[in-house]
Amino acid sequence: MPRDSLWLHRDFRLLWAGDTASQFGTFVGRTALPLLAATTLAATPLEMGLLTASENAAFLLLGLPAGVWVDRMRRRPLMLRADLARGVLLLSVPLAWWAGVLSLPQLIVVALLVSVCTLFFDIAYQSYLPSLVGRSRLVEGNGKLQVSQSVAQVSGPGLAGALAQLLGAANAVATVGLSYLGSAALLGRIRTSEPPPSPRTGIKLRAEVGQGLRFVFGNRHLRAVTACTASGNFAGGAFASVEVLFLSRELRLPAAGVGAVLAVAGVGGLLGALSASRWLRRVGQARAVWLVPLLTWPAHLLVPLAEPGWRVGFAALGLAGFGYGVVVYNVAQVSYRQAICPDGLLGRMNASVRFVVWGVLPVGGLLGGVLGEWLGVRATVWITSVALAAAVLWVLCSPLRLLRDIPADQLLAVTQDSPSSAGDSRAGPQNSPTATQDSRS
């Protein structure tokens, strides 16, 4: 094992373990809360829609100012507070159920407040990672964190269903709350000193938000990456609105078959997380941002070719190939963003990107539902699959196509602007000092 491997970095291992617990809580919770609403509270379709919308509302409502607030604070204490708040909020659900007073409005409020905490946790963790491991090891760090996210994404829904079946839906939510408290306990043991936040300049909130947006959209490389991710998420949101209908009605799969196809897609993402670092070493960090999507995202065009019978495999293969490429792309582009951004702007940069690329999801979902009603489910799958494959054109036609790795002048500018976040920060035994979904971007 190399001496500088993050396996030997005690505080990164704690961050990784805490983030893993948080990710499992997130993906189990996204299934457990709707199950509770549907089975225990007999929620209507409209009420289920409100609950689902509340789970992502914070990214659209608070995404931009959240980046400013994160840049004004130390990131690890903020992550601790977010975990503790999520744990308490979710534990209120089984307590209310045990007391016989649980209601759907409480679930909606809890989901909304948890989404606010998740927003701050995600922005803070992506902004904290460079100061913890150094910019030279961002690819390795993001790759390991992405593995945890992919495993949680694959196994979370099934685990939520099993817990709900075994313990009851309300008690399944209790395990989610406990996972967030466990994450907080792990993060609390990190010893590395975090650089202080940038001094307050007296600049108004709107101006600071503008700084983050100008950094993202004033940089040709970041602008292309953001447009690519947003286009993919917009088309992905539209596809997600008809995905289950396509698998169950067009391909005539039972519920277990639908789950199996989605699980195969998740395995593709997990393999992508495990091999992302190898891709970036072999082809270059900048080149991987456009080359991997070019080679893998067109696999989604296999999905609308699927038919009942053996050709159901086209859907599984297409989703797995696409999922593989998305995860490698996320590791590459998140590491690239973190490496070229000064530490004092990391929160605002990450929040600006997330505001754009997550804010399009509900809009895409609404459009997918309209197209499915108007043109039919299979036609909508064709349209969204073409759009997903075409999203790579943003980065393919950008200046990134001419690069292999991050330009040295961009790294030099970062170290000059933010010496506390330079890549030579000591790690491991010395105890000194980030997609998407996403990245969770």
Image (spheres, rainbow, N blue to C red):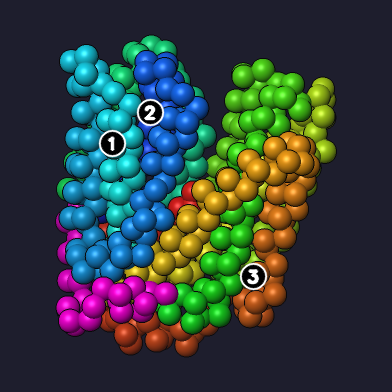
Disc 2 to disc 3, C-alpha distance: 37 Å
SS assignment for the magenta stretch, majority: loop
Residue 318 in sight here: no
Residue at label 3?
A: 395
Residue at label 2?
A: 33
Which residue is drawn at the image coordinates 29% and 19% (left, top)? 171
Of the two numbered discs 2 and 3 in the rendering, the one whose residue sits closer to the viewer: 2
Residue 156 found in image quarter = top left
User: x, y (%) of residue 400?
Assistant: 62, 76
Query: Do the CB atoms of the residues marked 1 and 2 lie less than 8 Å apart?
Result: yes
Q: Which residues are magenta?
A: 190-213
- Label 3 CA crowd tier, 10 Å (few <14, some 14–19, many 20+): many
Q: Relative to 317, is 68 on the left or the right?
A: left
Q: Nearer the viewer, residue 434 or 234?
A: 234
Residue at label 1?
A: 110
User: Quick check: 320 above or below 168?
Assistant: below
Judged from the image, the secondary structure of the residue bearing numbered disc 3 is helix
User: x, y (%) of residue 139?
Assistant: 47, 62
User: Quick check: 111 above or below 64?
Assistant: above
**Of callouts 1 and 3, the N-terminal one:** 1
**Of callouts 2 and 3, the N-terminal one:** 2
Judged from the image, the secondary structure of the residue bearing numbered disc 1 is helix
Residue 267 found in image quarter = top right
Residue situated furthest top in the rendering:
166
Judged from the image, the secondary structure of the residue bearing numbered disc 2 is helix
- Label 2 CA crowd tier, 10 Å (few <14, some 14–19, many 20+): many
Disc 1 to disc 2, C-alpha distance: 10 Å
Q: Relative to 257, is 8 on the left or the right?
A: left
